[in-house]
Amino acid sequence: MPRLAVAMLSHEGNSFSPVPTTLADFQAAVWCAGPEARLRFAGTESEMGGVLAFLAARPDWDAEFLRVAQATPGGPLAPGVFDAIRAEIVEGLAGGRFDAVYLALHGAMMVEGRDLADLELIARVREAIGPEVPLGVSFDLHANLDPSIAWLVDFASAYKTHPHVDQRDTALRVLDALDRTLVGAIRPVGAIAKAGAILPSINMRTDAGPMAEIEAIAASLVTGPVLEAVPFGGFSYADTAAAGAAAMVFADRDRDAAVRAAGHLRDAIDARRDAFFEPLPGPAEAVARALAVIARGEGPVAVVDAGDNPLSGGIADTPGLLRALIDAAPPVPSLMIYFCDPELVGWAEAAGAGGRLEGTLGARLSDRFGAAVPFAATVVALAPGAFAARPPLICGPGIDFGRLALIRLDGAGGGIHVVLATRAASPHDPGLLTALGIGQADFPLVGIKAKNHFRAAYAGRFGAILACDAPGPAALDIAAFPFERAPGHLYPLGGGGGA
């Protein structure tokens, strides 16, 4: 009976976020091992759900779930947090006799004062299991990969959709390759080729546009000895020596074929570089466009505050879009999702539903992205903010905003409602609105701190979705951030010429 070791350490690190990622952030999101991991992920479309589906189809396999850890994107991990989780995974591997190992990583993990944390983890795992045990790894499409990873793993794959709705399928691809490697049917060898740019993700969806074209080219390369070809958009806000887009290819017993195909896919990324740099309106212009769409009867409309997207390391604290909404005084009911402010939620709870609340919104953590917005409001609703995640996008078995409050600001036209939370999490799941007893249809205009992932659940609910660029930890102008470790030649940091 083959024995499989399974572990996850998944985190997307934003080097420019003022909020570090702590052990408590993992424990509040995904933190489990052993039988608990099987229970939490049973029936989900996640990587761990893929592992369980693989095992169900192969009753001759056994698996041990080591540490399974994931946190919402944020600032770099403290060194001690990374070292502790890495040590737990490596010690679990060293203490068991496994026939194969599967790691679920993001690929853009940042550790304070260190570089290439994902590479370090993979290298330690390889050292623990030796050169003969097949090691498979799955990554996010937005991974920043060091090319030496291809020499340390036997097979790897990554999400091929954005929004990422193929997490389960990605795990299954890796596990199937491990199975075939173990029985000698294939002997994968890989190559990673780095592209010449750090790319913004706002125009990186895979339903259309440049990334859809690149994914199609990658699929066409899987022929002959080539087993897998994956483009990586990279994560724009991780300041690391491995920053930037890349191409990864694995071939059966033919390293040269992998190198050639990876180079071809890298060239396809570079050729489409400029198409990723889609200009965005500022928040005031985006709100004006949204109101024009509503006036034509083509709403409802969502205005996306991409610069404070929690799944890009946003902090749910930047005031730009809210200020634009207030200045516009929309004539229709509007909803702003959301601000993370534990103190304000506590005051709302003390006031109770129907009570009054005054204070400021935004700039609680930093005024680098704009000054706080004074407000007076009525408390509309209070609710717990933890709920089970639902397809199509699964970032973990559950979502936890801590405690929630819904307030209605005084004045401002048809009424601006604002969601408050005590914890930062991604608002991509409509369960957030359900928890507060409201529906998206109640608000013709919705401002949301998000980017692309929320479209997986919300796209069919809006007549239009308009992205804006407001100041924040994930703002569009990549070159404006103070990069120090990323290679200076990467476009747009160091030029790179026309594409």
Image (cartoon, rainbow, N blue to C red):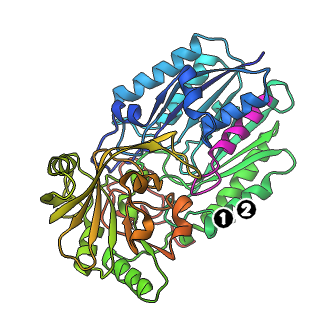
Residue 413, located in which quarter of the rendered image?
Answer: bottom left
The span picked out in magenta is 159-179
* Residue 141, visible in the rendered structure: yes
Which residue is at the far bottom?
Answer: 296
Q: Residue at x 53, y 19 (%)?
A: 90
Residues at marks 2 and 1 touching, judged by CB atoms closer than 8 Å: yes
Query: Closest to the observer: 218 or 400?
Result: 400
Mark 2: give few (<14), some (14-19) or many (20+) Cα within 10 Å: few
Instruction: Identify the residue at horizontal 73%, vertical 40% (top origin).
Output: 173
- Mark 1 belongs to which amino acid? Ala
Residue 345 placed where, x, y %? 22, 49
Q: Which residue is mark 1?
A: 212
Q: Amino acid at mark 2?
A: Ala
Tag 2 residue? 216
Percent x, y of residue 458? 52, 63
Foreground of the two, 11 or 72: 72
How many labels, in total?
2
Residue 329 lies left or right of residue 473; in this view the side is left
Measure how far apart labels 2 and 1 are at the Cα level: 6 Å
